[in-house]
Amino acid sequence: MCGLCGALGAADHWSSGGRGVTRATPAAERYRQASAVNMILDHYGLRLKVWNDRYVLQGRTGKSAVVDHIGQLWPLAEAFAGVEIDPLDPALMSKLGVA
């Protein structure tokens, strides 16, 4: 797919916040979500960045993929990491300071 098609708008997803859910602008909400998600992804050597109205998931090897919304992220993150991402993993919980 060419870069232009990849930059065109994507369908809304409940994780995008929706109208009236937050006072933040859509762009600020994307940055907030990416920051929160990166606390988990860092444990697996992955990084999520905001790009236009979407996200870019980056792996350890430099591989990257455009993600339309947080709902699409987790299966792709597991594929990039090569392991199942377990939000209740004791090592992750300890790293986050919640265990």
Image (spheres, grey):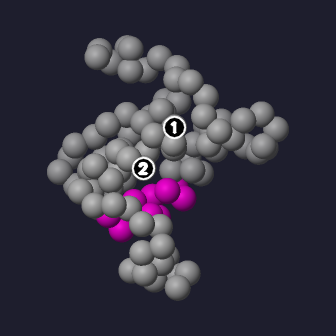
x and y percent of residue 47 in the render?
A: 36, 53
| Span shown in magenta | 35-44
Q: At 32% across and 37% down in the image, what residue appears? A: 65
Instruction: Select label 1 or label 2 by which is in front.
Output: 2
Q: Secondary structure at mark 1?
A: loop
Whole-angstrom CA distance, mark 1 to mark 2, is 10 Å
In the displayed structure, would residue 81 be above or below residue 7? below
In the displayed structure, would residue 40 be above or below residue 79? below
**Crowding near the residue tagged with mark 1, few <14, some 14–19, many ≥20 C-alpha atoms within 10 Å:** many
x and y percent of residue 17 in the render?
A: 69, 41
Q: Amino acid at mark 2?
A: Trp
Horizontally, residue 42 falls left or right of residue 30, namely: left
> Badge 1 is on which residue?
69
Q: At 51% across and 42% down in the image, what residue appears? A: 71
Prevailing SS of the magenta stretch: helix
**Crowding near the residue tagged with mark 2, few <14, some 14–19, many ≥20 C-alpha atoms within 10 Å:** some
Horizontally, residue 80 falls left or right of residue 26, namely: left
> Badge 2 is on which residue?
74
In the displayed structure, would residue 1 be above or below residue 61? above
**In the drawing, what numbered circle is on residue 8?**
none
Q: Secondary structure at mark 2?
A: helix
x and y percent of residue 70 in the render?
A: 51, 44
Q: At 77% across and 34% down in the image, what residue appears? A: 19
In reply to whether residue 6 is colored magenta, the answer given is no
Q: Amino acid at mark 1?
A: His
Label whose residue precedes the other's in the sequence (1 or 2): 1
Residue 28 or 10: which is nearer the viewer?
10
